[in-house]
Amino acid sequence: MLWIVIGLIGQVIFSLRFIIQWLASEKAKKSIVPDVFWYLSIAGSLTLLTYAIHQKDPVFILGQAAGSFIYLRNLVLIKKNNEKQKAKVGIMKAKNVSNN
């Protein structure tokens, strides 16, 4: 029973990402993918991967492992982009201070 609960929790987390993406797109009036989509993707995928390993289902394991890699890579790219943006802001602030 515990493993069924774990599998269901993973599926709920994984499904929430679509609701979050839909709501964010409706709010912006255009299709967007917020950062939280990727966090829910990796959390749901890793939970489902754990369940799939317990079930010894190679098809499910392969699918969730591949997806987890893609979600993790997107989070790395988001982090790198955020760091670049922060650096640009810091440079702009430094220029403004030196110009005054």
Image (spheres, helix red, strand yellow):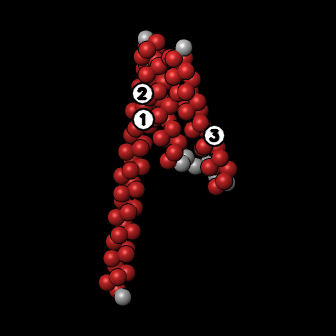
Total count of labels: 3
The three-letter code of the residue at mark 3 reads Ile
Q: Residue at x 62, y 49 (%)?
A: 24
Residue furthest to the top in view is: 56
Q: Residue 70 carries which label?
A: 1
Which of 31/78 is in front?
Answer: 78
Which of 68/11 is in front?
Answer: 11
Say if 1 sits above or below 89 in the image. above
Q: Earlier in the sequence, mark 3 or mark 2?
A: 3
Query: Quadrant location of residue 90?
Result: bottom left
Q: Label 2 near label 1: C-beta < 8 Å?
A: yes
Give the Cα separation between the discs numbered 1 and 2: 7 Å
Position of residue 43 measured from the top left corner of the image (x, y, whole percent): 47, 34
Q: Which element is circle 2 on?
A: helix
Q: Which element is circle 1 on?
A: helix
Residue that badge 3 annotates: 19
Residue furthest to the bottom in view is: 100
Q: In which quarter of the image is the N terminus?
A: top right
Give the Cα separation between the discs numbered 3 and 2: 22 Å
Residue that badge 2 annotates: 66
